Image: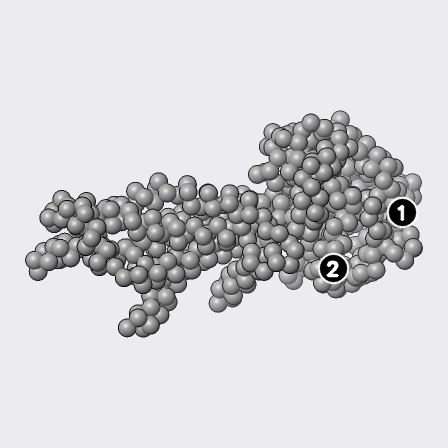
Amino acid sequence: MAYIGALVRLSAQAGYYAFVSPFRGRPLRLDRAFAQAMEVGVRALPVLSLITFFIGLILAMQGAYELRKFGAMHFVADAVAISMTRELGPLITAIVVIGRSGSAFAAEIGTMKVNEEIDALETMAISPVQFLVAPKFIAMMLMLPCLTIWANFMGVLGGSLFGVWKADFSWIGYMHATMDALFLRDIVTGLIKSIMFGMTITAVGCSEGLATGTGAESVGKSTTSAVVVSIFLVVIVDLVFTTIFFFVES
Amino acid sequence: MTAPLDDTGSDSMISLRDLRVRYGEREILHGITMEVKRGETLVILGGSGSGKSTLLRTLVGLEKPSSGEIWLRGKNLAAISDADLDEIRRKMGMSFQSGALFGSMTVGENVGLPLREHTKLENSTIEIMTRLKLEQVGLAGFEDYFPSELSGGMKKRAAVARALSMDPEILFFDEPSAGLDPIIAAGIDQLILELKQAFHMTIIVVTHELASAFLIADQMVYIDKGYIIAQGTPAEMKANPAPRVRQFFDRVPEPEVEQELDYLQMLTADHRRVRR
């Protein structure tokens, strides 16, 4: 619980430096946030595309296994579309980003801690949260929803491969079926979750990095725990928000 | 260019009153009281684990004292708001033992960083000032190199340039010559002397290199196990009769266990305890 409190405090500080202090004459370093966004978002595209494409394909096959018993193969498009946008798109994206960026945040900040660079920032009266953490928050909160939209699209594309191959869909027909199955709220709830995931991953990665002790070994430890804790907390956040959406939407 | 740190006109720059620092249960500094005068170079000497680095970290606000006072510019660092501490830190420069340059930035960006964060100067002005600072430490023309492309001595010099970038009134050095060959180390000493003469900076150096200490110091403080056990000018220190100080200056190792039999018994006793 104290750990969660520390994460919330770090997020609040980063939020202050990202969204409040720019209006008090402390300009935001957008170039740093932009560089982070490139690293977090654009460079993740190839691996994320491949993974979500296959996930879409797998979902279609798993769905078809059950659906064909009822002669309802044409619902494959609905099954893929809804499970991707509401759940797997945001979740798989989060897990890929944890592996790529959450671990990198912890390693980067942890190494800076070991090399006295964090101390150096403080003695120069530069807040490490403002300088290092805030740009990462901005980058993640912008890029995770974008990546999630892309992941949803690639998942549907993967599903359509099976749809055309085994479920008598045409490409156009599959896309139409997907459009008909989806409501805007399916996509929006997924995106809300992805923003929360982004905050969680950044908070965990950065606070593990800042909590690094001394020596190279402790950097490795912070990186490992950043990944493990992030995955756990992302699932918890997912559970909480899915529960909320379940009761709000019904 | 900047207002003096101490507006009262007294010549004391930093004064410590019964300063105590603890990590968890363990007290590292047991009541340090001392004075640093404006424009003076103070060398803090002591063996490994004596608490001298902790003292330095406390002076720059990286460690909070558990009790006592640190007076600087009419403010007590032991009970100061973060905003006031940042204000004071802008007049301080610190050169870390490892250099602590940011690996993802060039040397020029490292040196210009405090100016870019704290002033509204044009980029071109910052570039000129950066070049000036690098020239001061003998690194002109290296602004586009990355820290990983520099040698150990050059990294230290670049770190000094960064510490100088806000024209500080107090400069702190943590082990400036550790890990450098004698020629490069002498160069760093020379640099410290030049800074003192040219800018009348107050300089505080933590070191255990004796030759360097006697060369640059106006005042010396010897710390052992968290206590100041000797202080004075280099000449006074050389004449100090305290056994611990003599041992340090004369490079005498810790006494060995005298009786070989005792030593054997100590070993076997430990051995038995482990096996039991």
Q: Quadrant of the C terminus of chain A?
A: bottom left
Q: Amino acid at mark 2?
A: Asp
Mark number displayed over residue B202: none
Q: Residue at x 29, y 49 (%)?
A: A153
- Parent chain of label 1: B
Q: Is residue A25 visible?
A: yes
Side of B203 where A66 appears, left or right: left
Q: Residue at x 60, y 32 (%)?
A: B146
Dots 1 and 2 on the same chain: yes
* Residue B103: image location, x then y, percent: 59, 38
Q: Is residue A208 visible?
A: no
Q: Residue at x 64, y 59 (%)?
A: A24
Camera-side residue of B62 and B17: B62
* Residue A26: image location, x then y, percent: 64, 54
The colour scheme is: one colour
From the viewer's perspective, is residue B112 above or below residue A130?
above
From the viewer's perspective, is residue B221 above or below residue B157?
below
Pointer 1: what residue? B232
Question: Disc 1 and disc 2: Cα gap in Å?
Answer: 32 Å
Pointer 2: what residue? B84
* Residue A186: image location, x then y, percent: 30, 61
Eye-nearest disc, 1 or 2: 2
Camera-side residue of A174 and B204: A174
Q: Count how many numbered circles sit on residues in the image.
A: 2
Camera-side residue of A3 and B31: A3
- Parent chain of label 2: B
Q: Amino acid at mark 1?
A: Gly
Mark 2 secondary-structure assignment: helix
